Each structure stands twice: as C-alpha cells, then as structure tokens.
Image: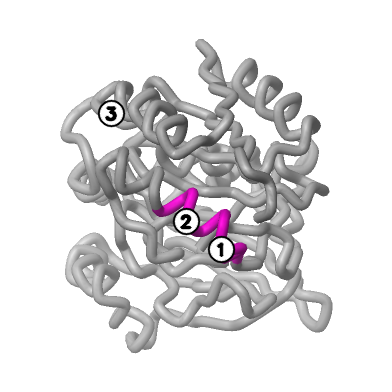
Amino acid sequence: MTREHPRIAVAINPTSSFGAHSAQGMRVVEALAQHGVEVTTLIEASADKLFNATVRAVTDAPDALVAVGGDGLVNLTINALAETDVPLAIVPTGTGNDLARGLGIRRQKSDAAALRIVSALRAGSIRAVDVGVVTTSLGERRFGGVVSVGFDARVNARANAMRWPRGGARYVLATLREVVSLRDEKLTMTDGLETLQFDATFVSIANNRFIGGGMAIAPEAELDDGLFDVVRVDPVSRLELLMFFPRVFTGTHTKLNVVHVRRQREISLTGAGIDLYADGEKLGTLPASIRMLPGELRVLA
C-alpha cells in the first residue's frame, strides 16, 4: 500500500443481529478516520439499495471494501466485488459470522478492528480465497461459505425468521424445532462424471468449514483449495438426527456411515421445488448448478 491516505468504503448493515450491533459500523468508520483513512460510508435502508451503493463505490476503485455485519452482508459485498481486484475486509457483527470464522477473523472492538484492517492494507497482507457461483432460474449469485439443501436450508429459513435468541443459539433452537417436521428430499446430483439419484436428509456444498454459527459441517474444507466439499447425509430418523446433531459442532459427524463426503469443482442438483441457501441467504430453488471460482476473492488477512 503506497497511498499516504488509503481510501476505504465501509458497508454497514444497520440490522445486523437485529440491530444489536448497529452502532459498531459508525465506530469502525470513526476509528479508520483516526488512522488517516479517507472513508466512504455505505448505509442504506434495504439490501438492494445497499448493494447498488456498494457497486458504485467499488467502481471508484477504493483500496479496500469493509463489511461490518454478518454473513448476509458479506455475501452482498462478495457479489458487489465480482470481477474486481478490490480486497474485502470483514468486521463480524452478525449472528453466524461463519465466513469470518473460517478466515480466522474474530470479533473485536472497533478500534482493534480498524487497526487490523489498516495494518493489513499497508503491509499488503492479502489472501486469495475461492468463491462459489450458484446459477438458478433467478440468475447467478456468488457465495463464500456453504450452499445448503434440505434440512439445514430449512433451519436457515427458520433462524432468519426468529428474533430470539441472538447469536449461534438461534440456529440451535431452529434446528430443534425443524426436527419435528423432519423429511427427506429426493435429489439428483451430477458432477460431470456420473449422475446420482438419492433421498437425503440434507446436502451441503461447502467452500467454508462452518455454517449456523460455528457448526463444522465440512471439517476438512479449505477456502483456497479450488474444490467444494460436498457433504450428503442419508435419510435418518428424528432420534438419529438428534444424536447426530452434537457431532456437527466438532466435525466428527463425517465418520458416521450415513455421511458421504466427496470433493468437486462443479455439480448440478435437481429436485422438485426445493430451496437452497448460502451465506444465510435464500438463493433460489432447484434446479441449480454450482461451480467454483478458485482464488477469486481477495481478503485482507
């Protein structure tokens, strides 16, 4: 970083964690300014307006884009950064913060987060990580974390609708409530070499290790290996799922016979009217194709 006064755009989600951390974004802006940074603050009333404002800001080629929020805001910024070299910095303030967790970025006070960002920028400490692309009837959408289909997608939908509790506990409660209406999904998966038809409790196409506020759904996944870890779980009973669930936090569930893991660069999924989620956001319904873009996203490490 050679510019004396770096120019940084800061995208803020005012509803991150349902407003619990809405003031932290402005504190990050103030802390960055104290480090001699020229800051463009991006804060809008809706996700669509914030996305458009972020795209415009990125077009002006800032030295970095900072996302102050959770996985949903990070997903918005990943899409706004498509086809650019502007690096992303994350200040996690959301419910799950799973991509930040996978990158080793922890929650910090605003001053510490600003110092971390400025220090990384001036040192040129940038990590290239992979990005996935989902294509559905709605078009293309990039993601950094995990595409969820089946039970874990329904958990995501329920957690999004809940206002209590905050943090990762919301995903735990949503999971327990979804167990009551547990059902299998009939899916067809094609990876270019073979086509599989199967019933599954859920399928996760993972770029990142974590979903749901720290569940290690794909414990061996790497953000920079150019491959997805595709985790498929055979149909299980409610009792089996309740016994299975605690093991997801430690990643030991992949040792069970009902769990199958394979590594792919690209797959297609079909199923009747089945929703898919990624980075906490609904991306559409099946059918969908999912492909990897190796090293596409630059992240301030």
Q: Secondary structure at mark 2?
A: helix
The residue type indicated by label 2 comes to: Ser
Residue sitting at x 73%, y 61%? 296
Residue on which disc 2 sits: 119
Residue 117 lies in magenta, yes or no?
yes
Q: Marks 3/2: CA distance?
A: 24 Å
Residue sitting at x 57%, y 42%? 75
Residue 23 lies in magenta, yes or no?
no
The mark lying in front, picked from 3 and 1, is 1
Q: Earlier in the sequence, mark 3 or mark 1?
A: 3
Residue on which disc 1 sits: 123
Residue sitting at x 56%, y 70%? 223
The residue type indicated by label 1 comes to: Ala
**Magenta-highlighted residues:** 116-126
Q: Are marks 1 and 2 in contact (CB under 8 Å)?
A: yes
Magenta stretch, overall SS: helix
In this picture, residue 98 sits left or right of residue 140: left
